[in-house]
Image: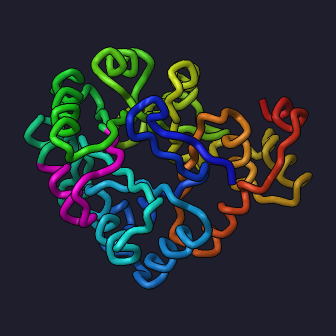
Amino acid sequence: MSTITIAAHSAQPITVNRLGYGTMRLTGPDVWGEPADRPQALEILKTAVANGVNFLDTADYYGDDVTNRLIAEALHPYPADLVICTKVGATRRPDKSWVPFNTPANLRTSIENNLRTLRQEQVQLVHLRLMGGHGGVPLEEQLGAMFDLQREGKILHVGLSNVGPEELTTGLKMGAIATVENMYGYAQRTTLALPHGLNHGGEEVLGLCEQHGIPLIPFFSLLNSLPKADNKIAEIARKHGATEAQINLAWLLHKSPWLLPIPGTSSLAHLRENLRAAEIQLSAEDMAYLG
């Protein structure tokens, strides 16, 4: 499995294998509550790490606070090379809605909660998730609070999530942005409206990330909204004896060396299938056909 380096030009760069695991699907329905099969959820985390995954993506509002506790239960004390990335800037209500939680005081509360549930003294990488309209709090105020927490040693590296080019440019003027996490996959590359707000696509910021040496972490990469009658990815999947999901991940890995996919699943079988995507070699002709 190839590797990627986060914050390469900082005093404390982090190198991870280039297929991570997103934990959101380990929760109950609607990303709420405990998993239906808790033993399998714990086994998925252990199996992922045992098979070379050393980048986990989580958030204290997954569950609510379910995935952090599962990670700690399954893996603590953590392997030395394991990077746990979390997100702040949002929270959940009992009606399962997603709402901003992004004032400086809110962000501090979220970081303290992540440190407690993950049993860490410092979070290695934290994405500031921007909600629609920034939740009434200017980006500069939110990001300034993140850099304050970084200076206090509670955060090692700061990233941004759900940003367009203007927001990323603003962030870069304020300080070191280690990573960007946006929705991105073969079938979904640009902004998409979801129930909890607009989600910026990876294609919008990939060039800017590459220019500045910033890894782009795609989420919802296995979303497939392609019409079946015009599904080129299915043809490439048949050619390689693979699933469409595997080719989707392989496409991301071949699209740019700055992409770090984090496919999530609640199935041990699907986890193993996703991991095998790193072994698929797409030709230049395959990539040109896929576009």
> Measured along the vertical axis of the image, is residue 226 above or below residue 60?
above
Picture residue at 63% right of the left edge, 43% below the top: 225
Res. 95 in view: no
Closer to the camera in the image, 5 or 162:
5
Within the magenta stretch, is there residue 125?
yes
Display coloring: rainbow
Question: Which stretch is magenta?
Answer: 109-127
**Residue 169, percent from left and from top:** 39, 16
**Residue 28, percent from left and from top:** 37, 70
**Residue 232, percent from left and from top:** 82, 41
Please identify the quarter of the rendering in which residue 196 is found.
Answer: top left
> Measured along the vertical axis of the image, is residue 227 above or below residue 97?
above
> Measured along the vertical axis of the image, is residue 46 above or below residue 199?
below
In this rendering, the count of numbered labels is 0
Question: Can you name the residue that lies furthest to the bottom here?
Answer: 39
Res. 12 in view: yes
**Rendered-image quadrant of the C terminus:** top right
Task: Tell me if 99 is positioned left or right of 53 in this view.
Answer: left
